[in-house]
Image: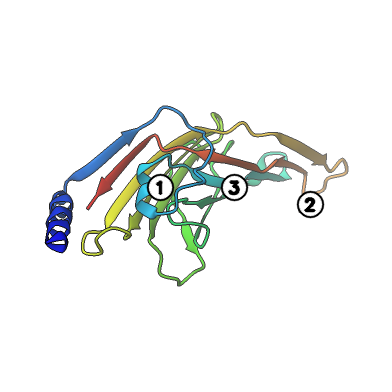
Amino acid sequence: MLTTTLTTALAALLLPFSSASPIAVRQDNTTTTTPPTNQTSCGATSFGNFSWALSAFDYHASYIYTNPAHQNSWGYVNFNLTNPAIGPSVTTVCSASSNQLNDFFYGTVQYTCTNTPAGVKSDVGKTKFDFNRPTGELRFNQSWTCRDGDPNYPTTFTGYAAVKLHLNCTEARWQNRSWKQGQIYSTRDVRCSPVNLSVDPKEMTAMA
């Protein structure tokens, strides 16, 4: 009798997850928080006080002038994301390069990240980002799937985040005072200290 009652109750709880409509939407105006430490299941973490661990954010740029009027310049962005619902076994690596002068990144181009280790099946889906160097805003979205409930009805989450980064950067400049045609005329290197922080989603959806 007890087994029949539990089976009936579980079936009733799982019934709403069979549709393809959103089962949860979360919005948050805060962009940073402390990651959860006591929740272990994928679903509980996703529905709880969820935040990504963003690590080793690096922006650097190189401006090379082959003559006073011509330059070959590039900017670079690199960072890692760890999803607390999936855990540290999978790291999402995000990288981009641009030669769009003069600040290279303006939040107008979206880049796709990759998951590591490469070739390992993961419940972390696609991650995309853009970066605006003049404002310091980093935006990204990521999807992931939790299977710790009924395996017939896994839940796929999608989180959207935006955080303003305050980068501490230094510049090094050099100029060839005795420049001749065919030589490098001047260089300018920009290097910023790595940034590590926790990032809350601005919005999160869940589908089953």
Task: Quote the CA–CA distance across marks 1 and 3.
Answer: 20 Å
Residue depicted at 47% across the width and 60% down the height: 114
> Compared to 117, does 129 lie above or below?
above
Question: How would you rate the neighbour count of disc 3 (Cα within 10 Å): few for under 14, some for 14-19, many for 20 or more?
Answer: some
Q: Position of residue 148 (x, y in %)?
A: 33, 59
Q: What SS does tag 3 mark? A: strand
Amino acid type assigned to the residue bearing label 2 in the image: Gln
Task: Quote the CA–CA distance across marks 1 and 2.
Answer: 57 Å
> Compared to 117, does 183 lie above or below?
above
Front-most of 41 and 206? 41
Amino acid type assigned to the residue bearing label 1 in the image: Thr
Task: Quote the CA–CA distance across marks 2 and 3.
Answer: 38 Å
| Numbered mark located on residue 86 in the image | none
Select label 1 or label 3 by which is in front: 1
Amino acid type assigned to the residue bearing label 3 in the image: Ser
Q: Which residue is mark 1?
A: 45
| Numbered mark located on residue 55 in the image | 3
38 on left or right of 168: left
Q: What SS does tag 1 mark? A: helix
Q: Position of residue 87 (x, y in %)?
A: 48, 56
Q: Which residue is mark 2?
A: 183
Residue depicted at 56% across the width and 35% down the height: 133
Residue depicted at 47% across the width and 50% down the height: 84
Q: What SS does tag 2 mark? A: loop
Front-most of 26 and 131? 26
Q: Does residue 185 appear in the picture of this structure?
A: yes
